[in-house]
Amino acid sequence: MREARHTVSEQNSDPIPPAGIDLERPSAARIYDYLLGGTANWAIDRKFGDAVVSKFPLARDLARANRQFLNRAVRYLTKQGVKQFLDIGAGVPTAGNTHQVADELLRGAGQEPDVRVVYVDNEPVAVAHADLLLNEEGDATRHAVIEADLRRPDDLWQEVLDTEIFDLDEPIALLLIAVLHFQQPDTDGNDVGEESVARLRELLPTGSYLALSHATDDGVPDEHRVKLAELKAMYAESASSSLIFRPRTAVASLLGDFQLVEPGWTWTPDWRPEETGPQAQRIRFPTPAHAVVWAGVGQKLP
């Protein structure tokens, strides 16, 4: 698929933004959309995205590899019999959304798609585009999108239940893909990402899964560590969200007491490559550590 390319000079051709959109600072969700080749972004996001790519030429491939981990995790979990996915921080819809991956797998196996998905984001553009996508190709009995904030997990959980999509007698796969390396500040500026995830783990039914990916500067090539530090400074200065690069042990702790499934924690290219879907792009790195994103899946056991 050809990537959408934009320049800052296209600003006048940008659509009028939905109400509540902040175009004073680049948005993490819209920057990610741009890096993936999407079009739900504005000039301010593209200018920042181009600066990211200039500083870190592998940025587009990192985003694609992370998206590929989502693809593989959904395929794996669907094969384990999971019928419910809660995709928090889902971002702007692009090729290979959670419900599309699951439905493609089931149809390929000659089964009627029956996986249920609730998408969650706090970025209005992401929610608006997801709503449009689901209106066009979704199933209102199986798919929903809500605007909610990870920093208020109980409120988020209640809004998810209010959709009446999920059955709490069945396992739910919680997806936190490339979410927690963005700081989740409370009113005092303290990151509450770990506490929010811990609360969601408590709320999930027994048998549920948590799939998580998180950028890290731990164990990456030296030249990447320098570029990641520069990237962190760029986000802190100009973007709507600041970055936090936890060490790999701290990323692993986000699964709590969930039992890690094989192959354990890996760099994104190494997580079950056999589960790569037929429509997924192939990405190659000099070494897996060049992908800088640490990924794993755990299950909540009795």
Image: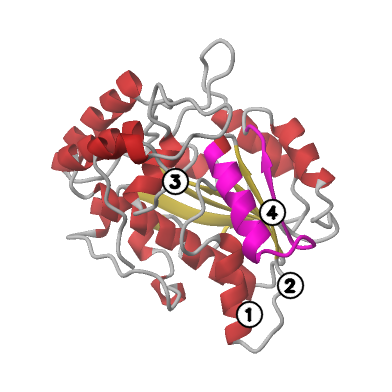
Label 2 SS: loop
Q: Are marks 1 and 2 in contact (CB under 8 Å)?
A: yes
Local crowd size for mark 4, using a 10 Å CA cut-off: few (<14), some (14–19), many (≥20): many
Q: Disc 4 designates what residue?
A: 300
Name the residue tied to disc 3.
Answer: 40
Q: Give the percent coordinates (x, y) of residue 280.
A: 40, 70
Q: Residue 106 shows which numbered tag? A: 1
Q: Where is residue 159 drawn, in percent x and y?
A: 77, 39
Q: Give the side of residue 55 with respect to residue 134, left or right.
A: left
Locate the N terminus by quadrant: bottom left
Is 138 displayed left or right of 293 in the figure? right
Residue most toward the front?
A: 12
Q: Which mark is residue 114?
A: 2
Query: Between disc 4 and disc 2, whose residue precedes?
Result: 2
Three-letter code, disc 3: Ala
- Disc 1 crowd rating (10 Å Cα; few below 14, some 14-19, many 20+) is some
Sooner in the amino-acid sequence: mark 1 or mark 2? 1
Q: Given contact means CB atoms under 8 Å apart, are the residues at marks 4 and 2 in contact?
A: no
Q: Quadrant of residue 276?
A: bottom left
Identified by mark 2, the residue type is Asp
Q: Tell me what residue is drawn at x 49 percent, y 37 percent.
A: 180
